[in-house]
Image (cartoon, grey):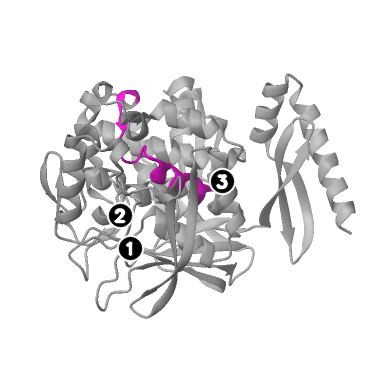
Amino acid sequence: MRVAYLDCFAGISGDMFLGALIGAGVPVDVLHEAVSSLDLGASLEIGTADRSGISSTRVQVLENGRLAEQPTPSHGHAEHSHDVRQHSHSHAHSHSHSHSHLHEDSDHHHSHDNKHSHSHSHEHHPHDHVHGRSLSAIRKLIQAAKLAVPVKQTAIRAFELLGASEAKIHNVDIENIHFHEVGAVDAIVDIVAASAGIHALNVSTWHCSPLNVGGGMVDCAHGRFPVPAPATAELLRDVPTYSAHIQNELVTPTGAALIRALAPTFGPQPAMRVQNIGYGAGTRNPKEFPNVLRLSVGETATANHSAVAVLETALDDISPQILAYVTEKALALGALDVMSTAVQMKKGRMGTHLTILCDDAKVAAIENLLLRETSTLGVRIHHERRSCLDRTHVAVSTPYGEVRIKIGSRSGEIYNVAPEFEDCRLAAESKGVPVKIVQQSAIAAYQAQQQGSR
């Protein structure tokens, strides 16, 4: 099974993630095409950088040929320009633009709150449309781009997570959030290009080390806060973090949102045969501190076998609506599968036996969900050993649009081939045809593709 491991000993930002993806084997054309599809006049400048002796990939976002995170005379009203200067001098950040205040000198994290200091005066500044996109506007921008469905879903999920963190910090409705800095071109490019790279890697499972958030203080629009700043801290709820080595902010909101959207298993590197290693460079080059994100990609050392946590409870006094809600929430928290079975319980009562499969890292959150949202007084938790086929995806073109094909194989022999249902459903709704027609067309396209490659 193909797996990836992110080593975040120097934190994570959007541009570092892009560099690591390229270093780990993602073709640069995948990222360039994703950026071009946004039609924002943006492009990527890709090069190499030395970080404490480590050769790493450096990615910068250009907007109309200029660094996107550099303020220009066309959008620098006095209040905004002052905030840029304030933040650029308040940290010696380690990375670049992958944070809510995405300017090269300010390094990437703090003004999650600063972006909202402008939201109330948004309508008074003609240039705020560049920096003040709403969540719905960003969704529309991504949906309109010529990108694969899963790429769009990951990118939108990352922005929804950013919006949710800001909404909670400022106690406002998520749809009223106007992203100033993370709604700017460089942040959108970072997230969308990273989403394209994530899916191009064709990895079955993601793993991640605990995140080094750095240390020190950051200046936000509402005062001085310890690292991590409020919005980043909100994004990192339930994520293992620590502070070490350097007194700078190391995790950006963009980096934190991408990690949350990936929903990896946190912990040490799993047993794996590493085939590709990529290093993504941060902006700064502190002395004796390699400011890089390392991404390792390979195959699991014990092929096709893994452990899975099983959570079970039986319920005889709960409504179907609540059960449906709990199922949705469990899947959103990262459950691998949720199953319900009709059972007969004591006193002849009909009940539901609920079974949830998940990785160890998700057990605590899902256990809490069951105890909080259902009527159960206890949850049974145990582990099972499972045998899995290696899973990969290929995309095929049909008359109804692009559809991903899920392939299950072992030792190079293909056992199962099936179109992804969500891709088929969306295509069927778009074209007004039955889902089964899209499924049949996708299988036929896959078979033709296989025959053509022989």
Question: For the point 77% across and 50% down, which residue is it?
Answer: 416
In the rendered structure, which amino acid carries the disc numbered 1?
Thr
Q: Residue under label 3, please give it.
A: 34
Which of the image's four quarters has the C terminus?
bottom right
Q: Position of residue 38 (x, y in %)?
A: 53, 38
Please report the bounds of the magenta region as a residue range: 175-195
In the rendered structure, which amino acid carries the disc numbered 2?
Glu
Which of the image's four quarters has the N terminus?
bottom right
| Measured Cα–Cα span from mark 1 to mark 3 | 23 Å
Q: Position of residue 448 (x, y in %)?
A: 87, 46
In the rendered structure, which amino acid carries the disc numbered 3?
Ala
- Is residue 52 magenta-colored? no
Looking at this rendering, what residue extends furthest in the left direction? 223
Q: Position of residue 61 (x, y in %)?
A: 43, 52
Mark 2 and mark 1 residues within 8 Å of each other at the beta carbon = yes
Q: Helix, strand or loop at disc 2?
A: helix
Q: Is residue 160 left or right of residue 206?
A: left
Q: Residue under label 1, please give it.
A: 283
Q: Residue under label 2, please give it.
A: 104
Camera-side residue: 209 or 107?
A: 107
369 to 276, vertically: above or below: above
